[in-house]
Amino acid sequence: MTQTEYEGRLFIDGEFREARSGRRYNVINPADESVVGTAADAGAEDVHDAITAARRAADETDWGTDHKFRRHCLEQLQEGLRREIDTFRKLVTAEAGVCAAVIPSHVDAMIDGMDFFNNLITEFQWEEDLPPYDFLGFTSNRRIRYEPYGVVGAITPWNAPFMTAIWKVHHGLATGNTVVLKSAPDTPLTAAMLAKVAAEQTDLPPGVLNTISSEDKAAAGDAMTADPRIDLYHFTGSPGVGQRIMERAADGIRHVVLELGGKSANVLLPDADLDTACGLGVAMCMNSSGQGCALATRMVVHASIYDEVLQRLEAIVGNLPWGDPTDPTNMVGPIIRLEQLERIEGLVDRARAAGARVLCGGKRGDRGGKGFWYEPTVVADVDENAEIAQTEVFGPVLAVIKYDGDDDEAVRVANNTRYGLSGYVQSRDEERAWRVAHKLRAGTVNINDSFYLSPDAPFGGWGISGVGVEHGVAGFRDYLRIKSIASPYKG
């Protein structure tokens, strides 16, 4: 597929169309600043049209109650995505800069994982009868019933455009909701391609899925969050934007599920296997160029192993392959845009000025003067309260913090953050690691060479890392209202 063939129009009420203004904007490849394609630049009027279509489909069709038909359509979607998997792989790398080395975790695994929610459509206990109960002189049967909210306003980030879009679209539709998907300005083409598969290879009714792209970071999102016809907002992104969405959703008391940022600690206890801990620690910080919310960006290391860990990190990260994201040997690719590159640069420069040591990297990369690059970086001797220890960098930067004390001290340092998305524990004694894991204030924790992400395990954050969960039966329920109905007991 060439760049001119990528679909970039809005998808509203079952049809592709341009924005009412006629405006389009360029989608830039962060690796070389070439134009990947163009996307429709939606305004408030286009958002209104999309919500109108979704509202009609939610209110006037049986999409929310016909479980067998929904499963049929979403199994079609899954197969359609499999048929177009090569296009999605290339597109995610082109518009988001995701390295080919990790593309299978962004695309292939997400399509395979659709089985779990597809099965839940027909296997979930949509109704449950309770035994008779006496109250106020009435003996009543009770039935608990799960129903979709109605219209979901889904807003996705740029760092994982396929992964986060398929989670929100698929999960929203599987639970019987209709969806308006607003993609990040940097990565609209993946969402448009998803809509193209839905339009051409499924029996999804018009209005059930709608996609919006907009060059302005806030305009379309503000139009969505101001519209009372949306019942549930499902957002992945920064805590600041998440808080704004939650505040606006309070008007009308509308439900929100927010997966926000992270500053996840990787705790290396004194008995950690350093081969595993350092190798895995680098991979879990640097993969996706460090542009991931649940990555292990703080390494909390016991004083007894601190110097050896730093030597290992300097050797590993200093020789980490970075560059062209289409080269499968590279782990670190480009930064999404200049603004983000400058932000990373400022955080590291200020850490250095405050007394931290930059063991390797710590500066922009250069690939012929094109693209947005930052070298894989290790910042050592970081104070636990320093800006770089408390702020999500969202780049290939690992901050190393030394602690001297028992495991409770390690826990205290790890928990010294407003975030609570993920955590990591390294110890040769797995029972010891479990004890630490239980004390970490985070929605997910990984012990040694393990990782939490799977379709059946809930994923969500504590603190400013979010509210609600994605995945698992708990994530399925987050898209559903609960209704209790009583009827007379007749013996």
Image: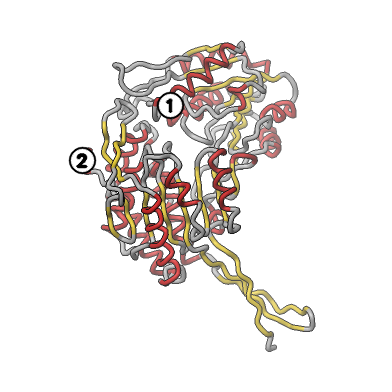
Dot 2, how many residues are within 10 Å of its Cα: few (below 14), some (14-19), or many (20+)?
few
Q: Position of residue 400 (x, y in %)?
A: 59, 20
Q: Which mark is residue 339?
A: 1
| Residue 4: mark | 2
For the residue pair 367 and 425, the one nearer the viewer reads as: 367
Residue 396 is marked as: none
User: What SS does tag 1 mark?
Assistant: helix
Q: Nearer the viewer, mark 2 or mark 1?
A: 1
As drawn, 209 above or below 440? below
Identified at 62% across, 37% down, the residue is 420
Q: Is residue 166 left or right of residue 138?
A: left
Marks 2 and 1, how far apart in space? Answer: 26 Å
Q: Please report the residue visible at 35 percent of the width from the left and 47 percent of the height from the top.
A: 42
Q: Residues within 10 Å of mark 1 (few under 14, many from 20)?
A: few
In this view of the protein, can residue 85 be seen by the observer?
yes
Residue at (44%, 44%) from the top-left corner?
A: 156
Q: Quadrant of the C terminus?
A: bottom right
Vertical order, 200 against 378 (above or below): below
Q: Is residue 139 left or right of residue 329?
A: right
**Residue 135: x and y, percent?**
78, 78
Helix, strand or loop under label 2? helix
Callout 1 amino acid: Glu
Q: Which is nearer the N-term, disc 2 or disc 1?
A: 2
Quadrant that contains the N terminus: top left
Residue 34, position in %: x, y?
26, 29
Asked if one can make out residue 119 in the rendered structure from this viewpoint, the answer is no
Asked which quadrant contains residue 464, the reply is top right
**x then y, percent, for residue 229:** 49, 61
Question: CB under 8 Å between callouts 2 and 1?
Answer: no
* Three-letter amino acid code at the position of disc 2: Thr
Looking at the picture, does residue 467 appear above or below residue 134? above
